Amino acid sequence: MVDPVAPYRSRPLVAALVTALLAVVHLLALVPASPAAAGGPPADRLVAGAVRGYGQSGTLAVAVDRLRFRATEGSIRAIEARTARRAEDRTDNGPVARRPFPTASMVKLFMAEDILTRAREGSIELSQQERVLLREMIRRSDDPAASRLWVRFDGAQMVRDVAARYDLPGTSPPPSDIPGQWGQAVTTARDVARFLALLPAVAHPEDSGALLGWMREATPQAADGFDQQFGLFGTLPGEPAVKQGWMCCVDGQRHLHSVAVHGSRVVVLFSEVPRSVGYDSARAALAAAGEAVAARIHTPGDE
């Protein structure tokens, strides 16, 4: 290693000044990045805004995180250790964000990641038609495409593998007594935020890029005709990567979920209302939460 002070050893005062300057530079390198430097407002402002915007329509789980990127050691723990100082980038609205919800179409994100990972590793062969199904499953939330891929590649195992790979404690496949009902897999808002935040660090860059690219191609209308523009889709500025989910009814509850990657931000909104609350009202409440997030996230550093 080159000694940066060596050229100045013969001049003690200069050497001392250089040493002091290097010490200051080293300390500055250890100072946590400020929210402004990281881009955008603190995560807790986004969470509080979403909760206030949603109101009393039902139950809302909110989680906010920030993308992490691949490092040479490739360890999730190592990546998190390096970003531990940036706690202001990751937060949620407490126990409800860690409560398992039916995934609805959020499980399609886990399926796509696992299928792409297994194909890259060579443990499965993926036809061109199946790659098209993957893309349509994400951008148009195509249920028949998801059902075919779930059966073809053992969907329950996909969910278990992703939960293990990304350390998602609240994520699991549907109960064994309801085979094929992939929408009844369970996950938490916190788990989905973690999954998307770690995606660029854990998945192969091409696979991460493909999945996020399909999310950016989300269509206003789903394959089944459902209007996908609710929550964070259609409210956030620019071209965020989004995924929407909806289903009725599990245990008498209607669910609408919306997730987005906007710049380096990850925002997850999971909602639950009684069956008696129609989709129009549920969509309006989640759109209000999305608009509240948009009002706070729209800063030059966060796009």
Image (tube, grey):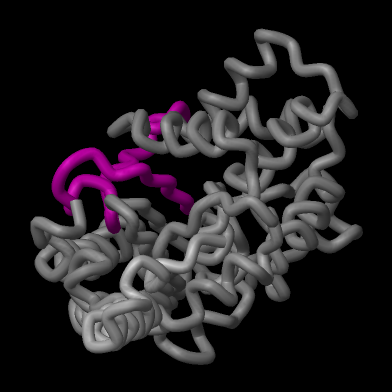
Q: Quadrant of the N terminus?
A: bottom right
Q: Is residue 69 visible?
A: yes
Q: Position of residue 194 (x, y in %)?
A: 55, 65
Which residue is painted at 51% across and 70% down in the image?
189
Residue 84 belongs to magenta span: no
Q: Position of residue 49 (x, y in %)?
A: 20, 79
131 left or right, relative to 223? right
Q: Position of residue 90 (x, y in %)?
A: 42, 77
- Furthest residue in direction top, as rendered: 128
Which residue is painted at 11% across and 60% down in the image?
298
Please determine whether, in this image, residue 46 is positioned above or below residue 250.
below
79 left or right, relative to 21? right
Which residue is painted at 63% across and 37% down in the image?
204
Identify which residue, 226 or 123, lies in the foreground. Answer: 123
Please determine whether, in this image, residue 108 is positioned above or below residue 15.
above
Name the chief secondary structure element in magenta. Answer: loop
> Which residue range is magenta in the image?
222-246
Please determine whether, in this image, residue 259 is positioned above or below residue 113.
below
Q: Is residue 58 visible?
A: no
Q: How many marks?
A: 0
37 left or right, relative to 10? left
Which residue is painted at 72% across and 68% down in the image?
167
Identify which residue, 121 or 235, lies in the foreground. Answer: 121
Identify which residue, 115 or 120, lies in the foreground. Answer: 120
Give the quarter of the image for residue 126: top right
Q: Position of residue 208 (x, y in %)?
A: 54, 38
Give the quarter of the image for residue 74: bottom right
Identify which residue, 214 or 107, lies in the foreground. Answer: 214
Residue 227 belongs to magenta span: yes
